[in-house]
Amino acid sequence: MAIHRTKMLIIGSGPAGYTAAIYGARAMLEPIMVQGLQPGGQLTITTDVENYPGFADVIQGPWLMEQMQAQAEHVGTRTIWDTIVEVDLAGGAPFRAIGDSGDEYIGDTLVIATGAQAKWLGVPGEQELSGKGVSACATCDGFFYRGKKVAVIGGGNTAVEEALYLTNHSDDVTLIHRRDELRSEKILQERLFKNPRISVLWNKAVESFEAGTDGTLGHIALKDTQTGELSTLTADGAFVAIGHAPATELFKGKLPLDDNGYMLTEPGSPKTAIPGVFAAGDVSDHTYRQAVTAAGMGCMAALDAERFIASSNYEKEPSAQAAE
């Protein structure tokens, strides 16, 4: 088992984590980033990115994350592909975390940038048919449904973006929404309504996903939210796009969370209830949830971590990026 010591430990990657790492490395904090199961976060499953500042042309999400990682490593960040399974924050700084590998990570400060994960409907057939016609990522799995009939469930930005993306592969895309109007940005709605490949089913809730004779998705059972009428929609693929939940399970009972599981921080700051522990990105942001705001929060976390170390009187352990 290896023990890794650093002035700034970052759990999770993505725009928040990588930006914290860049600023932390430039401040000589020798950051170690434990990347988690999905290095790069949600942008690694996003194709076209057209709202991140600095790029006149559309860029690809995975490419942007590769560039952020390369920049962080170039200035001195050490990235480790491991998943944290346990954290010890009770004694204050330094903070300890245990990885799935068995390695121990010790940081004088801790930046939590674990992001968010896709939400599921929790209806019959959803998990049983996962990977067999039911998915939560159109950009990951849309290619497998070229020329087939697909459906997207949801009414926010995620759902509309998924539906628009799927028209690259399918001429028959149905958006299913439980209300009579969408919650997505107006510009996305305009694109959706103008696209002849997309139709919308209003006031419909998914009751279940049903398998066909071959064991893959055959149809979706629906219920009208106003009349209660039951109906079915034949589909080869269904994409659940109802948003994301913050990845804070690891910190329950150790840091204050709100009713939806988002990490609570000091207003206008990434500071959590424990001095020296900071939260950045979608793990604490339930309002904006954008790559650029996550990056800004990562910057703030690194600057606050630098100030914490400079002003703290606790006796630090010797800092070394790895020790057996």
Image (spheres, rainbow, N blue to C red):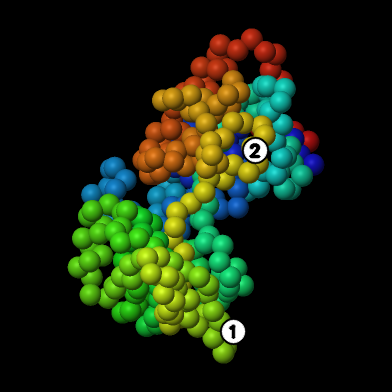
Q: What residue is drawn where x is 37% and y is 65%?
A: 226
Q: What residue is drawn where x is 26% and y is 65%?
A: 192
Relative to residue 162, is residue 323 drawn left or right? right
Q: CA distance from mark 2 to mark 1?
A: 38 Å
Relative to residue 250, is residue 294 drawn left or right? left
Name the quadrant containing residue 170: bottom left
- Badges 2 and 1: C-beta atoms under 8 Å apart? no
Determine crowd level at label 2: few under 14, some 14-19, many 20+ residues with C-alpha closer than 10 A: few
Residue occupying the far front of the picture = 227
Q: Which mark is residue 215?
A: 1
- Residue 152 versus residue 23 in the image, above or below: below
Counting from the top left corner in percent of width and height, residue 311 is at 56, 11
Counting from the top left corner in percent of width and height, residue 233 is at 42, 79
Look at the numbered disc 2 and give the secondary structure of its residue: loop
Q: Which mark is residue 252?
A: 2
Does the rendering let one see residue 162?
A: no
What amino acid is at disc 1? Answer: Gly
Q: Which mark is residue 194?
A: none
What amino acid is at disc 2? Answer: Lys
Counting from the top left corner in percent of width and height, residue 38 is at 56, 53
Does the rendering let one see residue 149?
A: yes
Quarter holding the C terminus is top right
Residue closest to the eye, 217 or 104? 217
Name the quadrant containing residue 322: top right
Q: What residue is drawn where x is 56% and y is 32%?
A: 111
Counting from the top left corner in percent of width and height, residue 108 is at 64, 24
Residue closest to the eye, 178 or 156? 178
